[in-house]
Image (cartoon, rainbow, N blue to C red):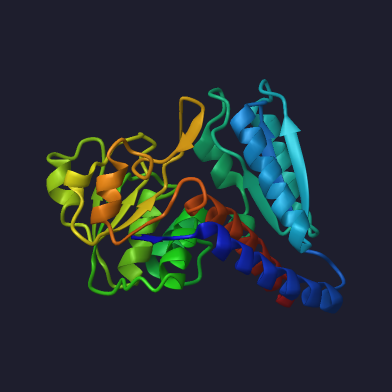
Amino acid sequence: MQTLNGTALAKKIKSVLAIEIEYLVNKYRRSPKLCIIMAGDDPANSSYVKSKKKSCNEIGILCDLNILPYATSQQELLTLIDSLNQNTEVDGILVQLPLPKHIDQNVVLQSIDYKKDVDGLHPMNTGLLNSSTDALIPCTPKGILSLLKAEGVSITGKHCVIIGRSNLVGKPMAQLMLRENASVTVCHSKTRDLPYLTRQGEILIIAIGHPNLVNAEMLKEGAVVIDVGINSVEGKLVGDIYNSIDVNNIEKKAAAISPVPGGVGPMTIASLLENVVEIYKKRMCD
């Protein structure tokens, strides 16, 4: 069984970006800049944003963290975003999700200038993803596609089954796989007879956040499995399938699996960096 090593590929992507950024800074006399906004002090969110800032700094992207109190009002958050939209020195804006319950996530995401929307979640980018190639692609689906291509996984004509229909992963992933000429089935919590569908998946992408969701009996022989899930079980970080209680049988049946950790996670951050640089280059060329 092949292990789809996201850590190694992400490292290569960051090395290439670092060289490109050095050239661009010499040319334009300004570094790319990302601003991250987080409301509250959730430990997991804090860890994520610090990891993103560290990765930015490693390759020459300036990164400002705006950590706001949990009680920050929606209007205060919108005012901050508006100021960043207007700031010509800011290339990308990222609002760390989830937001506190008293803040309307959709309103906040729609307030970001879609040309600075590094997460690709603005409705304009969603529409562009469905209709053209000129869209900022959500980081996790973009990273998954890059990983599949780098590992030589053939996509054209394959049946891709996706478990999860979130705006962050499932829906944009389906659009990307359709672009690559796969036939796509999207499953979710209301899907009947899930094992019947997963057994048809030549490429199976699991993004539901439920450990041990899929067992060996639910896999097609020779399937390529992408595990997007991140779960904590007895203090250990596990995915939705890779660390399943049925892991030995799964590894015998699958042709390739992305591990957790070390698979999709590093690729998500690498894709974020790519989006920041992409925005920066467009803005400097305008």
Across and down, in percent, residue 182 comes to 27, 68
Question: Residue at (50%, 46%) from the top-left corner?
Answer: 261
Residue closer to the observer: 146 or 78: 146
Provide residue 276's location: percent of width, then percent of height.
66, 61
User: Which residue is at 72% across, 48% downward?
Assistant: 53
Count numbered badges in the picture.
Answer: 0
- How far across and down, in percent of the image, does residue 224 sit? 30, 60
Q: Quadrant of residue 48?
A: top right
Task: Left or right? Give the position of 28 relative to 246.
Answer: right
Considering only vertical position in the picture, is 40 above or below 58? above
Q: Which quadrant is the N terminus positioned in?
A: bottom left
Q: Is residue 34 left or right of residue 128?
A: right
| Relative image position of residue 188 (x, y in whole percent) | 26, 41
Residue at x-position 63% and y-position 63%: 11
Left or right of 166: which side holds 101? right
Q: Residue furthest top?
A: 71
In the image, taking residue 8 as reference, residue 166 lies left or right, namely left
Image quarter hosting the C terminus: bottom right
Q: Is residue 175 above or below residue 264?
A: below
Instruction: Find residue 56 and report its image quarter.
Output: bottom right
Say which of 23 and 261 sits in front: 261
- Residue at 44% in and 50% down: 259
On the question of residue 35 being in view, the answer is: no
| Residue 275 visible in the displayed image | yes
**Quarter of the image holding residue 103?**
top right
